[in-house]
């Protein structure tokens, strides 16, 4: 039987708990404002771009530091109760801009169906 996808929300909560254990005087928002948010995952990642260029979503092992700009938005949306689907969409937008270096290009990034997701705080490492 297939495992359900990993939860972005739960991964953020786990990272926050670990951060509090290591550095009790800091907040998640302070950390992401300083150094962004590290993402380590095995998830379905793919893209579609005009005209007729695509790389179908497939499981990929992926590591990326998401910039403070996007990391702050992800953390704030999470704290306001965003769903995993909404958080996955934000991660896809961040990857479009930062990994694929294609803001405003018409490139459509797919991110979802993660087997596991780990977040870390580069500013605290």
Image: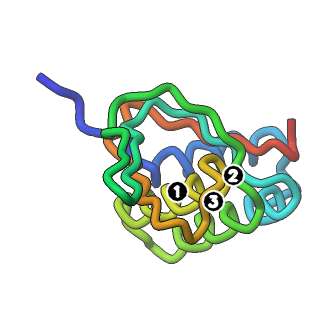
For image coordinates 57% across by 43% down, the residue present is 14
Q: Which residue is mark 2?
A: 66
**Residue 97 tag number:** 3
Q: Residue at x 75, y 48 (%)?
A: 20
Give the Cα distance between marks 3 and 2.
10 Å
For the view shown, which residue lies furthest in the bottom direction? Answer: 80
Residue at x-position 44% and y-position 28%: 60
Q: Residue furthest left?
A: 1
CB-based contact (under 8 Å), mark 3 and mark 2 = no
For residue 97, above or below residue 22: below
Q: Which mark is residue 91?
A: 1
The residue under the point 46% across, 59% down is 107
Q: Nearer the viewer, residue 24 or 71?
A: 71
Given residues 51 and 93, the one toward you in this image is 51
Measure the alpha-carbon separation of dots 2 and 1.
8 Å
Q: Nearer the viewer, mark 1 or mark 3?
A: 3
The answer to which of marks 1 and 3 sits earlier in the sequence is: 1
User: What is the secondary structure assignment of the residue under circle 1?
Assistant: helix
Residue 61 image label? none
Residue 109 at x, y = what percent?
Answer: 43, 54
Q: Image check: 21 left or right of 124? A: left
Relative to 40, does residue 70 appear above or below in the rendering?
A: below
Instruction: Identify the element where label 2 is drawn.
Output: strand
Q: Are marks 1 and 3 in contact (CB under 8 Å)?
A: no
User: What's the distance in space between the residues labelled 1 and 3, CA to CA?
Assistant: 10 Å
Q: Judge the density around disc 1: few (<14), some (14-19), many (≥20) Cα neighbours within 10 Å.
A: many
Circle 3 Cα neighbour tier, 10 Å, few/some/many (<14 / 14–19 / ≥20)? some
The quadrant in which the C terminus is found is top right
| Rendered image quadrant of residue 75 | bottom right
Q: Is residue 101 left or right of residue 41?
A: right
Q: Are marks 2 and 1 in contact (CB under 8 Å)?
A: yes
């Amino acid at each position: 039987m297939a495992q359900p996808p990993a939860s972005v929300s739960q991964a953020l909560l786990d990272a926050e708990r670990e951060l509090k254990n290591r550095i009790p005087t800091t907040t998640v928002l302070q950390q992401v404002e300083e150094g962004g948010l590290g993402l380590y995952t095995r998830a379905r990642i793919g893209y579609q771009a005009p005209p007729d260029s695509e790389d179908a979503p497939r499981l990929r092992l992926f590591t990326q530091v998401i910039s403070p700009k996007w990391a702050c938005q992800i953390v704030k949306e999470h704290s306001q109760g965003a769903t995993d689907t909404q958080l996955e969409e934000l991660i896809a937008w961040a990857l479009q801009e930062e990994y694929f270096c294609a803001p405003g290009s018409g490139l459509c990034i797919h991110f979802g169906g993660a087997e596991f997701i780990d977040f870390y705080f580069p500013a605290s490492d």
